[in-house]
Structure formats: structure tokens, C-alpha cells
Image (cartoon, grey):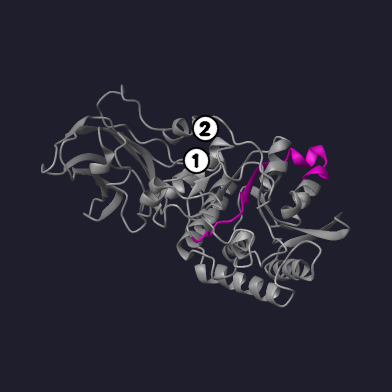
Amino acid sequence: MSLSVPPRPAVLAIAAALAVGGLVSATAPAALAAPTAATAAAPTPPDIPLANVKAHLTQLQTIATNNGGNRAHGRAGYKASIDYVKAKLDAAGYTTTLQTFTSSGATGYNLIADWPGGDPNSVLMAGSHLDSVTSGPGINDNGSGSAAVLETALAVSRAGLQPTKHLRFGWWGAEELGLIGSKYYVNNLPAAERSKISGYLNFDMIGSPNPGYFVYDDDPTIEQTFKTYFSGLGIPTEIETEGDGRSDHAPFKNVGIPVGGLFTGADYTKTSAQAQKWGGTAGQAFDRCYHSSCDTTANINDTALDRNSDAIAYAIWNLGASTPVPPGPSFENTADVNIPDYPGAAVNSPITVSGVTGNAPATTKVDVNIVHTYRGDLVVDLVAPDGTVYNLHNRAGGSADNLVQSYTVNASSEVANGTWNLRVKDAAGQDVGYINSWKITF
């Protein structure tokens, strides 16, 4: 991530509104809705192997070690890093372009990789900066983003993915000197080519050792895609502010291209509230080795790197298919169900599904709207027709009220037709509420 720090935005209030998009109205009639017409679903995103991503990081570490301890612009370690990534992509069937520019008296390189096929007039692009600062090997900043984007691109090749959109990936040079490489790329795109980019996804520092889970809020559709993925894991996210204007999404955003991305934190300090919901150590930086010699392969949180790598694939597979992903058949129950206070029994809100062929998808979506005075008391499960339980919410969220959230559930082993239940239990005393509505989309 670049060193320059612009003013932080004053207002981020739209995030809460985005998080509840698509839920049923509280004033809807108390009845079960008929299924909507089925449409073609996006292909199921793969699990990105953590071991593969870490293998790329090991290679980047070795390159830095063999070249003066860094992979900075104008140094041998950076060119060797570009050559490593390019060789992987060439072997996987990508059309690669090495773009050169000059900064600080040295030649810099951007690597662009295009996957064959897709609509050339609708390009989904993902990228990361590959350079480090001169003081260290830059394994979290930004080997982490570069390795995860690389492995996602290789997963596209392994799957033989043929998305609706044309897929393009980029690795940028001289980001640490002020976003030089990405600015060069954007500034040299003809206006007609810029207009073809439907979105740019940026990944800069996604394996911080004391991680947070931050999502860019620049474009609502991209933002919600990432938030939906993390909701499916039961992981709360926050809007990213530390890196605003400091990474390679900025040149794209400045010319009107929709942008989004993920971030696990740099030298800002993790608060007690953040440590409570994400783990880690309050009062310490998200990355104590930011821009330092200790930013090595030992400076990576495997869990954060794994989750964020999978989130990249989820976004590429879904946003590459269409924006937004066409929904499958949807069913909802808007009947209120009171939730008794602890130690009362769990309550169920049923939805009977019929007319759906085969099993539920791996990206079954569950929208929950629960009115409650203390959501940290609640345990919420999706119960499949055969009794299999999928936990959606387990006493997270602290003292905040109401649970209005979307979750993605891998229910691909379940037959879709039958009675599904939203099961809710109050696990602590003194607060009450009710299930306002919920919806399941296949």
C-alpha cells in the first residue's frame, strides 16, 4: 500500500442501508410467497487452496531474499516477481501483456492477463500491486493480494470458466511510489476501452497478522457481493477507510470505473470492539511489520488469507456471470413469530419449497429479518428438510439490536423441495423480539 494518506471520508452511513437490500417488507402480508421463475445461476465458485497461495508467497520471499531483501520498483527483485507471475499465467492459457513505464529514472512494469472469451464490451478486472518497499520483501504488502489474485486466475483456467463478462487481471508496478503503474495503465487506456470496464476489484494486504475484515464501499453491487460472502461465513465486516485513495483502485475510480475490494489492515490500531468480533490483539496494529523488513512469510495470518482468497473467487465467479447474479426460485415467510426470552424453547418459522429441480445450490441465499433488542442473545439456524442444521448466527453482534442480514449457505447436499425452517433461540435473559420475515433463494 502506498504511503500517501489523503483525508478520510466523513460520512459512511450508506453502508447500513446497503446491508439490508433485498429483504421483504415488514408490512407484507403474512403468507408464503409463490416461487419466482428460475433463471440460469452463476457457476459455483471454487475453494481457493491456501497451500497454493502460500506457495506463491514462498516464491516471492525467495525472490526478495536473492535480490537484496526486497521486490521494489527498479530493483531486480521486482522484475523477477513479474517474470514469475507471467510464466504461471502463460502456462495457464492467458494472453499476457507486459506494459513498461518509467518512474524515478527506472523502468517499471505492469502485467496484464486476459482470459479468452466473454463479452469484450463488458470487462471485469481484478488486480493488485506486486512491488514492495525497499525496506523489506513485502509479503503481506502486497504479496498477499498478488498471490491470491494469481491463484484465482489459475483457478479460472483449471475450471475452464466461460463467464458472461471478459475477465482481465492486473499486477501493478511502483504502487509504493504513488500508484504509478496503475495510473499509467488507466491514463493510457482510450476512453472507449475505459468504458468497457464494468468493474475493477483491488486486493492490497489481505493476510495481515492481526487482521480485520474490511470491504470497500465505493460501488454498492461490488460491496454487497463481498459482504454476502462474509455473511455466509458468519464474519462481520467493516467499511474500509484506512486505504482510501492509497491503493490502485483510486485511478480507476477517478475516471468513473466502479471499484471495490478487500483489506485486512495496515498500521492502524485494532480496537477492543474489533478484537472482540474478529479475534486478535486489541491495541496493536493490524500489521506491525507494515513497510518493514519483517514483512516476510512469517507475517501472514493464514485464516485471513484463506478467507479473502476464497472471497476473490466468489466475486469473480459471480460478478463475471452478471451484475447482479440472477436469482433462482425464491420463497419467503412474512408471518411474525415471537421469540421467547431465555430459557424459553427455540421457535421455528417454516417455508415449504416445491417445484425446484434437484438439490439446493452451494450458494443458497438466506435473508433474515429479526426484530430484537439484543442480537447478541440469538442463535439462528437454517434447518433443512432432512433435519441438517446450518448455523447462520451464533450470538454475534454484541448489544446491537435487530438482526437484518443475508447469508450464503452451501446446501448442495440437500434436496431443495420440502420444508425448511428458520430456527431461532434466545440464549440469554432480559431481551425479547420476533422473527419479522425470512426468505430463501436457490
Q: Which mark is drawn over residue 12?
A: 2
On the picture, is 99 further left or further right than 50? Answer: right
x and y, in percent, of residue 244 in the image: 62, 41
Q: Which residues are magenta?
A: 186-209
Could you tell whether 377 is left or right of 194 in the image?
left
Q: Residue at x 61, y 45 (%)?
A: 243
Residue 349: image x %, image y %?
Answer: 21, 38
Q: Which mark is residue 101?
A: none
- Quick one: SS at disc 1? helix
Circle 2: is it few (<14), some (14-19), or many (20+) Cα within 10 Å? few
Q: Which residue is mark 1?
A: 224
Mark 2 secondary-structure assignment: loop
Q: Is residue 371 magenta?
A: no
Mark toward the viewer: 2 or 1: 2
Q: Quadrant of residue 297?
A: bottom right
Q: On the image, which quarter does residue 139 sit in?
A: bottom right
- List x then y, in percent, for residue 134: 73, 63
C-alpha gap between disc 2 and disc 1:
15 Å
